[in-house]
Amino acid sequence: MKALVLGALGAANLAVREVPDPKPGHGQVLVRMRAASLNYRDLLVVEGKYGSLQKRENLILLSDGAGEIAGLGEGVGEWKIGDRVIGCFLPDWKAGPPQEQLARRALGGAVDGVACQYRVFASDEILPIPAHLSFVEAATLPCAGLTAWNAVRCAFSSGPEHVVLTQGTGGVSLFALQFARLAGATVIATSSSEPKLDRLREFGAAHVINYRQDSEWGRTARTLAHGRGVDLVVEVGGAGTLKQSIRATRMGGAIAVIGVVSGVAAELNLALIAMNSLRMIGIGVGNRAQLADMLRAIEGHSLRPVVDRVFPWAEFAEALGWLQSGKHVGKVCLEIE
C-alpha cells in the first residue's frame, strides 16, 4: 500500500511511498482510509518538536482520519465490512481522567498515523461516523473536534448562562464556537480580518473583535461580557494571547489552555490569577468515551464541521503550507487515494 511517510525530520523528507500491507490480527479491524485532516501539531511533528516520545524516522503521519472497514480479524463481532469509522487520537485512553501511561501512543506522533491507504486498529480504537457526514468531514473530529468538546462541554460545562471566548478561525476554535452555541452559550470570537469576522458571525458568534485593530481585546471582551468578563476562554494562541485571555476572564472563570501557536513560554501575573480565582485547565484532546458523546451530539443536531480546503494527499506539503499560513477558516484536509 501507499503511505505518507516522514523518512527523517524536516519537510524535505516527506513522501508518499510504498510500505508493507497491514493485516488485522485477533480483535483487530483493517480500515481503508479515505480522508485525513491536519492539525497544528503536525507542523511540530514534521520538525521533531512534538516531544521526547515522537517517532523520528519513517513515521506515517497524521492523527485524524476516516475510512471504512475492509477486513476483520478473528474475534471481532461488533463491526462489519463497510462500516464507516474514525480512529481515536489516544487509542489507550478509553475513559476516566488522564493518566501518563494512557497518553503515550498518540497517533501520528509516538506511533504511525492514518495518512495511509490501509490501517489496522483494535476493535475498541474506532467509533462509527455520524450518518450525515462525509469521510472528509469525519476526518476533522478525532483531535480538533474532541479537543474543543473537552474544553467546552467536559472540562467546563458550558450552558445558556455562560459567555465563551474563542480565538481565530482554526479547527479547534470553530468547533468550540459550534459546541458552545449548541449548549446555548453566548460566544465572543476574535480574528485578524473583516472577512474572517464575517464568517464567525455566520457561525453564530454574538460579538467579534479584530485583535489586530484592538490590542486590548481582552478588556473589550470583558466589557462585552456584561462588564464582568467571560466565563470560559478557549485559549489556542499560547504565549502571545494568554495575557489578554486573563484580562477577559471573570472572577472564578476558566481558561482552557490548548494551543501554542504564538509561543510556548509566557510571563504570568500570578497575583492576578490568584486574586481572581482563575482556573487554568490544560486540555489534552480527550478519551474514547468523550469522543462517543461528541459524536452522538453531532449526529443528534446534524452539526457539520467547517472544512476550509481539501488537498490530494500527494500535495501534503502544499496543505501543510496552507495550514501554516493561517489563512484558513476551518479544517485543512486530505483525500487519500
Image (cartoon, rainbow, N blue to C red):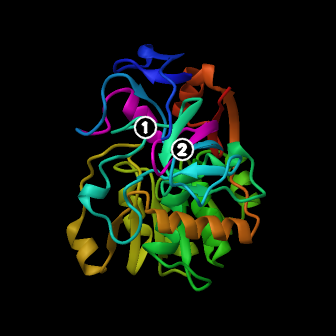
For the residues marked 1 and 2, what is the alpha-carbon distance in whole angstroms?
A: 8 Å
Q: Which residue is mark 2?
A: 64
Q: Are marks 1 and 2 in contact (CB under 8 Å)?
A: yes
Earlier along the polypeptide chain: callout 1 or callout 2? 2
Q: Residues within 10 Å of mark 1 (few under 14, many from 20)?
A: many
Quadrant of the snapshot with the N terminus: top right
Q: Amino acid at mark 2?
A: Asp
Residue 28 lies in the magenta stretch: yes
Q: Report which residue position mark 1 lands on.
A: 108
Q: Residue at x 62, y 77 (%)?
A: 185
Q: Can residue 79 be seen at all in this image of the molecule?
A: yes
Q: Position of residue 322 (x, y in %)?
A: 59, 29
Q: Is residue 227 above or below residue 298?
A: below
- Magenta region: 25-51
Give the secondary structure at mark 2.
Answer: strand
Verify whether residue 257 appears in magenta.
Answer: no
Q: Residue at x 34, y 43 (%)?
A: 263
